[in-house]
Amino acid sequence: MNPIAFSINGFDVRWYGVIIGTGVIMALILGNINCKARNYNFDNVMDVFLISFPFAVIGARAYYVFFEFDQYKNNIINMFNIRQGGLAIHGGILFGLTTAFIYTRYKKINFLELADIAAPSIVLGQAIGRWGNFFNGEAHGGMVSYEFIKHFPLFIQKGMYIDGSYYHPTFLYESIWNLCVCLILVYLLRRVLKNGTVILAYVGLYSLGRFFIEGLRTDSLMFYGIRMAQLVSIGGMVFSIIFLLLIYRKCYLKKLI
């Protein structure tokens, strides 16, 4: 696939950036819809987004560079070049949510309520953003036969034909999984649930899908022979389950009292 969308006066605009931008716009549109459904002030969401998003990008890049430092130690300036990819979503989520938490505490905004509304938008942005990996020819899995890949649309087949071999379109698997998670979260958001339910469901469900999909990938960030994304995913699932149990156990005890 050609990673260049178009050029302006010799400056190449890559599909990766176009798709990331599209994901952000669609995420904000969904956020506005969800705010109206919950009768929540969308201005709060925008304020937090404008503060958190730059830190999320910085965190996503810093996380990636940390584990791939050997690629950059002799060319430090290239650490700041994200036009060809190299953004790790776990770093983005960590930095973005941490920034949002600090800001909401400062502004005396209920973090969990806002995070619940933002969760479907976050995973929708991820679902769209994965297509940027497709155009960059990255985030794919191991080699597969033509008998396997022929069941996919022709443009997927062509995009996954790299250096004479076909590869698992893991970007597609994760994109589809994330879209399914988004629909589940939108459904949960429409129900009367305790604050924190939707964002914790996002953490758990995304981690579940990522754990299995990561096992197919060939470009995983590694830590002493362990795939970091799988390790973080296990942590995410455990975190989600524990805190969901705590939230609803507390609610159950209040009813008994």
Image: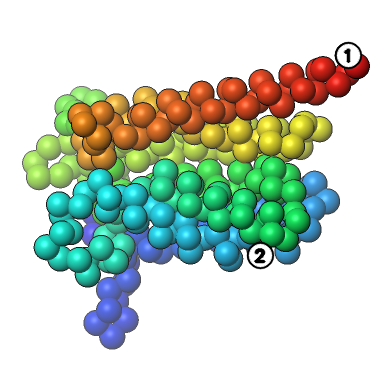
User: For mark 2, what is the residue?
Assistant: 47
Residue 77's place in the image compared with 57, above or below, is: below
Q: Earlier in the sequence, mark 2 or mark 1?
A: 2
Is residue 160 visible from the viewing direction of this image?
yes
Q: Quadrant of residue 62?
A: bottom left
Q: Nearer the viewer, residue 216 or 256?
A: 256
Q: Where in the figure is residue 83, as x and y percent of width and height?
A: 30, 64
Q: Nearer the viewer, residue 86 or 75?
A: 75
x 27%, y 53%: residue? 65
Q: Where in the figure is residue 221, as x and y percent of width and height?
A: 26, 40
Is residue 45 visible from the viewing direction of this image?
no
15 lies left or right of 205: left
166 lies left or right of 136: left
Disc 1 secondary structure class: helix
Q: Quadrant of residue 13?
A: bottom left
- Circles 2 and 1, Cβ within 8 Å, touching? The answer is no
